[in-house]
Image (tube, helix red, strand yellow):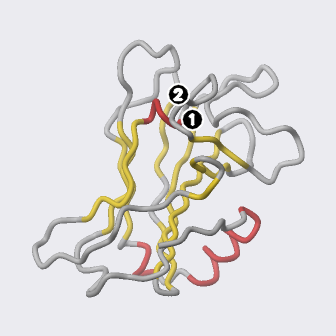
Amino acid sequence: MSCYPLSISTFAFVLLSFVPLSAQQKLAITYSGNSYILSGSGENGKINCIINSGTFTKRPKDVKLYFYTQNDVRNIPMELVKNSKPLCPKKIRPRRNSNDIIVFSTLADDIFFTTASNKGYSWRWKGRARPPLSPVVPVNGQAVHKVECWFVLMADKQVYSSDTISITVQ
């Protein structure tokens, strides 16, 4: 399984042009916390990307997963990468039962950081200015109050998009 980057500039085109309405319901994003607390006092929630059961009848090939976040200060989506490469989802194995498949899962503390991550995660964007360390870091003195997150999964020449969730930053 290989992962190739989807540039943020082509993300909007791909999302608006090729995602059928029925495909949007096959990918879900969940956050187990109520909000994200910057102070680091306690564990924040977990972010999951879930494929609904019945989406694939056989194991898909050429699977790529993208996680995007946009804060309320800058209107530029940021893409999460690990070790400077796009995210690689877990292997997708269709199941006969009704269980959904978690293809990506991480703690919010591992990706929303205020100092460099020791987990290998980093963020990139197509903005002209130097990118912030992560979407929750204040931008030009303005505190971030909310981040919106979504997943895009490409498999077997199909594009699946999750709904957008909002996470309050405190």
- Estimate the spatial distance between the alpha carbons at disc 1 and disc 2, rounded to whole Å: 5 Å
The residue closer to the viewer here, 71 or 152, is 152
Q: Which residue is outermost to the right?
A: 128
Describe residue 135's horizontal placement relative to residue 164 as left or right. Answer: right
Tell me which amino acid carries mark 1.
Answer: Lys
The residue positioned 57% from the left and 30% from the top of the image is 117
Q: Which mark is residue 125?
A: none
The residue positioned 32% from the left and 71% from the top of the image is 92
The residue positioned 48% from the left and 34% from the top of the image is 110
Describe residue 9's horizontal placement relative to residue 100 as left or right. Answer: right
Up-down: is 145 above or below 39?
below
Disc on the earlier residue, 1 or 2? 1
For mark 1, give the secondary structure.
strand
Up-down: is 167 above or below 64?
above
Density class for disc 2 (Cα within 10 Å; few <14, some 14-19, many ≥20) is some
Query: Label 2 near label 1: C-beta < 8 Å?
Result: yes
Residue corresponding to mark 2: 169
Tell me which amino acid carries mark 2.
Answer: Val
Q: Position of residue 135 (x, y in %)?
A: 64, 37
Q: Position of residue 123 (x, y in %)?
A: 66, 44
The residue positioned 52% from the left and 66% from the top of the image is 152
Density class for disc 1 (Cα within 10 Å; few <14, some 14-19, many ≥20) is some
Q: Which residue is outermost to the left?
A: 97
Up-down: is 9 above or below 55?
above
Image quadrant where residue 72 sits: top right
Q: Position of residue 102 (x, y in %)?
A: 30, 59
Q: Which mark is residue 146?
A: 1
Image quadrant where residue 14 sits: bottom right
Q: Position of residue 32 (x, y in %)?
A: 31, 39
